[in-house]
Image (cartoon, grey):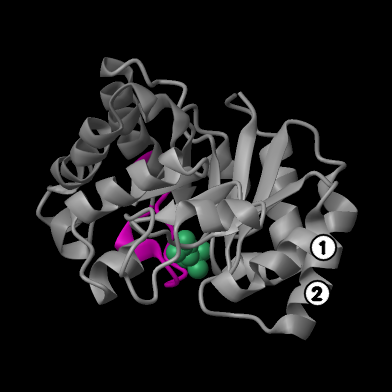
Amino acid sequence: MTMLVVGNWKLHGDWHSNAERLAALHGHGAVVPGVTLAVCVPMPYLQQAQQALQNGAVAWGAQDVSAHATGAYTGEVSAAMLKEFGARFAIVGHSERRQYHGESNETVAAKARAALAGGVVPIVCVGESLQQRQAQQTEAVVLAQLEPVLQALQQDAGRMVLAYEPIWAIGTGQTATAEQAQAVHAVLRARLQQDGASSVPVLYGGSVNPGNASALLAQPDIDGALVGGASLVAEDFLAIVQAAATPTGH
Ligand code: PGA
């Protein structure tokens, strides 16, 4: 299976620093066989990403998308609008949006459906808090997050991307071990399989860096990475991409 490595820039960047980072990716992105590479940038910079990356091997996308196609929804951006700027992906249901913007599992499912309807691939994020992990609720939590998405997408479920991002590992430097991540990925894969969607790429996210990427990406059910902090440093991001190109477990 092709590996997928996606950078999530979050609320970082400006025109000048973006230009440098995009140029570095554009220069190197084409020479990594077996890896699809993408960056999810803040909305205003979609056109900058499009201009810098078009006709190359690196795809781009957004970090959110509206659940609605059109209408009186101030501040929202539809999948069709993203598509006009060449966006291939939209991250949906990132834990920061669930936490700070009150997005429910049902909202996330509606956004995933709207993304696909508009021709954009949703990267649906699931993941447990530290408290939930300690209470042995990890599997139940991620499955409960996934379920409404599968119901909303129905036979289109196979067209999404899933990302397991344990909240306690995001931005903390505390990565899940490869074994911890693989255990959850196997659960997610089994659930996807029930719906005939076992080919959905399941990415791992949470403090992925050049030092830990190889071990994570070598796990049989880890099909790539969703990278936050390390995606802001082009050489770190490209080192992770290289790790994805040479995993041992796939
Ligand atoms: P991190 O973020 O790599 O900085 O932990 C990952 C994410 O939130 O997608």
Q: Where is residue 60 in the image (x, y as percent from the top left)?
A: 65, 54
Q: Mark 2 points at which residue?
A: 19
Tell me what residue is drawn at x 36 percent, y 28 percent: 157
- Asked whether, in this view, residue 26 is left or right of residue 3, the answer is right
- Tell me: residue 70, above or below residue 34: below
Q: Where is residue 82 in the image (x, y as percent from the top left)?
A: 56, 57
- Asked whether, in this view, residue 31 is left or right of residue 200, the answer is right
Q: Which residue lies furthest to the left in this view?
A: 135
Q: Nearer the viewer, residue 80 or 8?
A: 80
Three-letter amino acid code of the residue under disc 2: Ala
Q: What element carries label 1?
A: helix
Local crowd size for mark 2, using a 10 Å CA cut-off: few (<14), some (14–19), many (≥20): some
- Tag on residue 52? 1
| Magenta run includes residue 106 | no
* Residue stretch rendered in magenta on the structure: 165-180
Q: Where is residue 128 in the image (x, y as percent from the top left)?
A: 24, 55
Three-letter amino acid code of the residue under disc 1: Ala
Q: What element carries label 2?
A: helix
Tell me what residue is drawn at x 81 percent, y 40 percent: 32
Tell me what residue is drawn at x 45 percent, y 71 percent: 171
Q: How many numbered marks appear?
A: 2
Distance (Cα) linking label 1 and label 2: 7 Å
